[in-house]
Amino acid sequence: MNPTTKRKIAIIGGGPAGLMLAARLDEKKFEVTLYEKNTAPARKFLVAGDGGLNLTHSEPLEQFIKRYTPVSFFEPILRNFSNTDLQEWFKSIGVPTFTGTSKRIFPQKGIKPIEVLNAILKVLKDKNVKIQTNYTWKGEEMNADISVFALGGSSWKVTGSDGAWTGYFKEKGIEIIPFQASNCAFKINWSKNLISLAEGLPLKNISLKSLNVRKEGEVVITAFGMEGSAIYALSPQIRQQLNEHQKAFCYIDLKPSLSLAKLTKFLESKPANNTMTNYLSGTLNLSKSQMALLKNLTTKEDFTKPETLAAKIKELPLEIVGLGPIDEAISTTGGISLEEIDTNFQLKKWPGHYVIGEMLDWDAPTGGYLLQGSFSMGNNLAEYLNKSAVVHS
């Protein structure tokens, strides 16, 4: 009897999607080689972990799925390999996790990002996955039966994620959506007075709304504009408006814990011997940054009318005029159009070639959703290939 012939798989890109794919492929069916541009895999993964490696989020799955754009693309992917499944997998390779106060999920305290990466690489070593570093793909056919591209998006070029691969796919007639920054700083033309009072200060316990989507969290006022988790989560809505109108509106609620009616009543109850400024900062506990924002985006007349001022506090308009630099963005949208792949990530115009990870045109906020999306794609493609593989003997 002839020895079993394994199918050769080339994985081009050693980020989260590529690593998870390699870790989940059946070594009895496949001979796997992972090609990495840098001297070692997962450089962006390690850089992202500098402030604490946020692997995923503990949000219930039904709500979790809604964080992704487009939801229709991600729903089956996440139902098959959820945030709970990812935690179980990490636990199985020696990386237990914990849920922080923000409901984000991290490796257990004391476990460093490099140790998480090493645990994944040990899985690959045990499966005899070959890793070839310092390899830059330039459009060539790989010496493999199946090729999987996981080349990343176009932010943080220093990590190797530069989007330089797009031209090779365009040559094959594959549609590429132009890259745009996501989870990035947003440009607002603040007055000099506001910057002098509030630059670098956080706005805490606020909510932001754009195109009727509301997010709670924290942001920071910068000379460029605004950044932080609450506004990052509105990236799709803000980007849509910028693309259509060259400007976008976002509305900030400085006191989400109070209804408009209660707030109006509160302002109407201000003692005559107290100024509205002192009343807002002292009794309502508006912070220095909140007061600076309110005063610079309203008129003196607004401060004399409790009903008008209450409405401004609950829905203060911010005009956004641009995105931050793409290379400084946490992630990007754009890349290969989702119309170019089938339900198993295979390119319709290039059979035998698959695409996963941030190369595809999708979006998600920070908080573990980005990593989860890439890990889930890697896992799901592995499951499909494992099931469909025919081993010749």
Image (cartoon, rainbow, N blue to C red):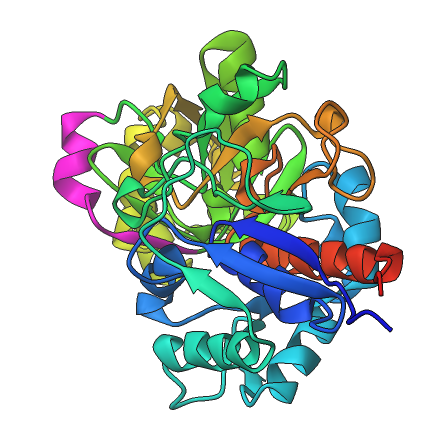
Above/below status of 28 relative to 316: below
User: Residue 90: horizontal and vertical position, in percent?
Assistant: 60, 80
Above/below status of 119 relative to 309: below
Is residue 192 located in the magenta-colored stretch of the structure?
Answer: yes
Q: Quadrant of residue 84?
A: bottom right
Q: Quadrant of residue 391?
A: bottom right
Q: Nearer the viewer, residue 152 or 156?
A: 152
Task: Determine the residue positioned at 32% across, 60% down.
Answer: 47
Task: Determine the residue positioned at 82% across, 55% down.
Answer: 384
Q: Nearer the viewer, residue 154 or 132?
A: 132
Above/below status of 363 relative to 15: above
Q: Is residue 104 left or right of 300 when viewed as pictured?
A: right
Quadrant containing the N terminus in the rendered view: bottom right
Q: Is residue 212 left or right of 123 when viewed as pictured?
A: right
Q: Nearer the viewer, residue 312 or 187?
A: 187
Residue 285 visible = no
Is residue 240 located in the magenta-colored stretch of the structure?
Answer: no
Residue 333 visible = yes
Residue at the far front in the pictured view: 1
Q: Nearer the viewer, residue 381 or 299?
A: 381
Residue at the far top in the pictured view: 245
Quadrant containing the C terminus in the rendered view: bottom right
User: Residue 356: horizontal and vertical position, in percent?
Assistant: 63, 45
Q: Is residue 104 left or right of 61 when viewed as pictured?
A: left
Q: Which residues are magenta?
A: 191-204
Task: Determine the residue positioned at 54% across, 16% down.
Answer: 170
User: Residue 37: horizontal and vertical position, in percent?
Assistant: 35, 48
